[in-house]
Image (cartoon, helix red, strand yellow):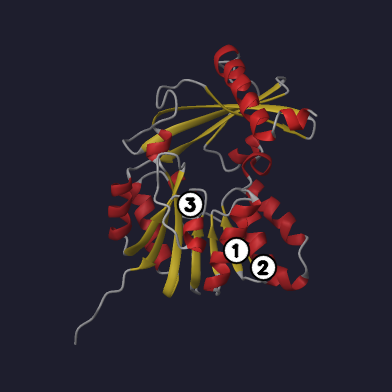
């Protein structure tokens, strides 16, 4: 009776409204960090339980599978995290190399690898390393930088250097799918760059209740934003962590990508653009923007 009277979408909206009032206006995290604060650390993701809170939806992974399977060839998964996307690609028959800096995240990816059969394990190469220093001898059909890993670099100089390096890892007809954070979406969030805690999400995982807040402030230069997160578990344990993120307007990203030697094939806000053939241009409702890139072909005249 209750589900018929209150559809799931209505219950979700009601829950979000109550949470917004209670945790965004009444209850706030303490101004001082309880527990060990972590900032820009190798394993900062561990403090907010990446797989529990940020693992992508299955339909999104299926879309990535279709795109990569259509292209075939080996894939390079840049900043692949705990390996949930790479695992799905390997199970779909593709060969994948994942590179990840965080020892906690790559450790979880290894746990996924151990559950695969021998053929699948042979097609998934895991590298614990810095995405700023990828030294690989073979080329790839598809490069993936999903979820914005390259926006966590320190400045545009590092970003340009990485982009140039990755271009050399693509085969002649290779494609690079690059996710970046959409400044039009994030700048519309409450208290942008004002250093004020805002409710991010509430979630129940394994009988435990989690509440997370985030705040943003200016970084060391114009394109850099300081992101901080505070996670409460049953309101007894608090963990605070943060990082720096690069935010640039769409036009600035395009200039940088062209400077790095890429041709921008398409820019979209929804991966369905790649499987449906329809256009999904970025909007202020998209937290991420995806660039579909190819190496710029330089014609030589004899």
Q: Residue 65 carries which label?
A: 1
Q: Which of 22 and 122 is in front in this view?
A: 22
Whole-angstrom CA distance, mark 3 to mark 1, is 15 Å
Asked whether the viewer can see residue 83, the reply is no
Q: Name the residue under label 2.
A: 92
Q: Of helix, strand and loop, which one carries label 3?
A: loop
Q: How crowded is mark 3: few (under 14 residues within 10 Å), some or many (20 or more)?
A: some
Mark 1 crowdedness (10 Å alpha carbons): few <14, some 14-19, many ≥20? many
Q: Which mark is first along the chain, 1 or 3?
A: 1
Q: Residues within 10 Å of mark 2 (few under 14, many from 20)?
A: some
**Picture quadrant of residue 171:** bottom left
Q: Residue at x 73, y 23 (%)?
A: 234
Q: Position of residue 243 (x, y in %)?
A: 49, 36
What is the secondary structure assignment of the residue under circle 1? helix
The front one of 63 and 249 is 63
Q: Which residue is drawn at 38% across and 60% down?
A: 266
Quarter placement of the C terminus:
bottom left
Give the CA separation, mark 2 to mark 3: 22 Å
* Image position, residue 162 (x, y; %): 40, 57
């Amino acid at each position: 009776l209750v589900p018929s009277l209150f559809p799931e979408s209505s219950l979700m909206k009601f829950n979000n409204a109550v949470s917004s009032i209670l945790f965004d206006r009444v209850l706030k995290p303490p101004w001082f960090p309880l527990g060990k604060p972590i900032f820009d650390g190798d394993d900062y993701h561990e403090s907010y339980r990446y797989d529990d809170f940020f693992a992508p939806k299955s339909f999104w992974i299926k879309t990535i599978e279709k795109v990569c399977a259509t292209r075939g060839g080996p894939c390079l998964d840049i900043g692949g995290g705990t390996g949930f996307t790479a695992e799905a690609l390997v199970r779909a028959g593709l060969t994948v190399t994942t590179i990840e800096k965080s020892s906690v995240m790559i450790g979880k990816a290894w746990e996924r690898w151990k559950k695969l059969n021998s053929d699948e394990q042979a097609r998934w190469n895991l590298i614990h390393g810095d995405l700023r220093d990828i030294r690989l001898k073979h080329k790839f059909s598809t490069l993936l930088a999903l979820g914005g890993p390259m926006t966590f670099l320190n400045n545009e100089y590092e970003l340009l250097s990485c982009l140039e390096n990755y271009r050399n890892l693509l085969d002649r007809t290779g494609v690079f799918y690059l996710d970046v954070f959409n400044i039009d979406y994030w700048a519309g969030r409450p208290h942008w760059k004002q250093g004020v805690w805002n409710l991010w999400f509430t979630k129940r995982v394994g009988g435990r209740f989690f509440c997370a807040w985030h705040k943003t402030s200016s970084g060391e230069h114009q394109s850099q934003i300081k992101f901080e997160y505070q996670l409460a578990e049953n309101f007894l344990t608090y963990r605070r962590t943060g990082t720096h993120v690069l935010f640039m307007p769409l036009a600035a990203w395009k200039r940088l990508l062209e400077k790095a030697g890429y041709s921008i094939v398409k820019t979209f806000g929804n991966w369905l653009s790649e499987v449906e053939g329809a256009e999904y241009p970025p909007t202020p409702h998209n937290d991420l923007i995806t660039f579909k890139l190819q190496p710029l072909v330089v014609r030589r005249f004899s």
